[in-house]
Image (cartoon, rainbow, N blue to C red):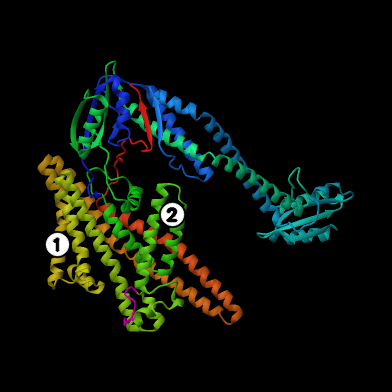
Amino acid sequence: MAVTLVPRMVAETVITVPREELDHLVAELAPKGLLHPEQPDDKLPGSMDRSYRRWLSHLSDKAVKLERYFDVLKASPRSPGRIELKAGGWVEAAEAAEKEYSELEAEFDEGVRLILEAEARAAELARMKGFYEAIADTDLDFTRLASVKRLIVTAGFIEAEATDSLAGFVEEKDCIAAIKEAGEDRLLVLLACPPENAEGLNRLLSDIGFQALRMPEGMPGNPRRLVEHLDNLIKKTLEEAEEKRRSLLSRIDEAGRYYHLVLALREAFRLLANARTTSRTAVLQGYVDKSDLGRLEKTLDQATGGSFILRVLRLLRRSEEKKPPTRIILPRILQPFHKIVRMYGEPDPDEVVPTVFLAVTMPIIFGLMFPDLGHGLLVFLAAYWFYRKARSEDSRLTWTLVMVLGGASMVTGFLAGEFFGPMTHFASLWERLGFEHPPLATPLFAIEHGNEEMLNLLVRYALTIPLIVAGVILILGTFLGVVNSLIRREYGELLATRLPKFLLFTAATAPFLVTMDAYEGGGIIRDATLGGMHTTAGKIVGIVGVASLLWIMLGEPVIGLIEEGAAGLKHGLAAAFMETFEVVLMLLGNIPSFFRIMGLSLAHASLMYGFTILTEMVWTGPVMAIAGVLIYVLGNLLTAGLEAIIAFAHSLRLHFYEWFSKFYSGRGIPYNPVKTPPIVSIVIAR
């Protein structure tokens, strides 16, 4: 399959057929996935049938409702085999489908409602049980307290800090109090006082935030029996829900057939709802991939017997009048990364699609932030487990992405000598292979070995890696900005800002890429800015950098003067000032931002080093060895979970803010052609 670096060119088309052929055209066109429909131009003849739009809305709602049913039943709408439906027209087909499955739909409506109500009731009972579990060992019927004569008896909860006030009152007023812990710094208090102290007791209880204990109406007043009763109720309620779920699952294949049929009908009505009709003709308008024009013409010929007009208005990637959809083709291996791109926004039809580049840079940056073979393996296995459980293609793509990132951590972890922290002594493998240290070892490795010379070397490496990544990302981003200007033929923007920005970021980061060393590259930058440009490299960087800034400052005014005269010059000066200010801020902020790669890598190694020291401190004998193992295991799980989330968040930031801001807008419209499920065949009789 071809890989999209730039969105494919689409053709804006208008299709005209005899009115009586519209239903047959839709029947032929809908399964092919060729046409991205849009509302026809008002200048075209005819009107739009509102009943088609009502059916489209109705079927869309029904599809969502059925998807909700599958979620509740924890099932997937499996492919039920071939589905065939014959009708005289599309409205008739939709009505026939609803009639055929009306009894099934009613059963699922009622069954799913009962399941949701039962699960909500079980959740409420579980919350109630959790409240009374803290006092479940109290063998006293609290509902009988009100029947005690000659004493005021009450029970409830107070905060632990209120015990002194309560104790003073009890001693002064000749009351009796029984107190026990009720969890979360709360105490259960049973108070008995003479009637004459009622007013003072009420005032005290109000002051100390007393919460009276109220037993659920119609249930045992004894906490122990109440908890047992709630347990039985929860079990019974969940069993009822599960029984109803099993009953519905026995018809899940029928529900799957209905769901796929609804999807097919919905797609057909997407075409019908965007058709303009007169008494004689029907018109469809939309976008087609340029390479699919031949297939479209052949489909029209088969559907209408040659009675059609296909007019290609224009071939385009962009339009000043309206934005065409973005047509992207990606192999499955890249689709998980396109989900990341779409988090930022759909590509415009006239800009570079960053998915291919992201598929390389995202795993590398994530792995450098989270280098641990063991932790990466945990992430990979967890993602694989969720992948196997996923019920939708979208979920499977998500967990595929996580598996790739886990694999990247395994690779960098191997190179860093990290495998569940230093207690495994995995780094010694590199020493046995003849290396002084693992290739991606952090400075902490040298600290562990007490080697000051190695520490200086590893600190140098730790500074170099983020700067190399920064150079690649920033140069690539500004270069793609140049490419986008060429694609859009925005030559003024290209000359005014895109080219000088590319040269400026190249000058600022190329020394680190050329020397592959933070100190040497930094020396070139220092010579170019503060050192008087005594070296050849310093002169090149300094001259290119200064020239680029001057270019940015003068580009907008010069182009504005050429294109619009004095007014353009004035506008260009203001724009150039803001652009220069923004570029300088980006230059000063973007490069240091990549040091988060080093920071997170060091944080990860430091956390595991800390858990290692804590484990060794606790591990003082056979008995305490169990505690040491627990500390190390929990420390690894905690670090793996938190670090994976943090590394992913920071990888997103580096891509979205430091990279995409240089070239990517993400304001496109997805290309979404009408495409019915392949297992559904709807035949419209002539």
Q: Position of residue 447 (x, y in %)?
A: 39, 80
Is there any visible trace of residue 159 in the rendered image? yes
Amino acid type shown at disc 1: Val
Q: Nearer the viewer, residue 471 or 164?
A: 471
Amino acid type shown at disc 2: Tyr
Judging by the rendered image, the residue that carries numbered circle 2 is: 387
- Per the picture, the main secondary structure of the magenta-coloured stretch is loop
Q: Position of residue 558 (x, y in %)?
A: 12, 47
Is there any visible trace of residue 530 in the rendered image? no
Judging by the rendered image, the residue that carries numbered circle 1 is: 544
Q: Which residues are magenta?
A: 433-440
Dot 1 falls on a residue whose secondary structure is: helix
In the image, is residue 135 above or below residue 236? below
Dot 2 falls on a residue whose secondary structure is: helix
Q: Quadrant of residue 80?
A: top left
The residue that appears at 38% across and 38% down in the rendered structure is 679
**Quadrant, the C terminus:** top left
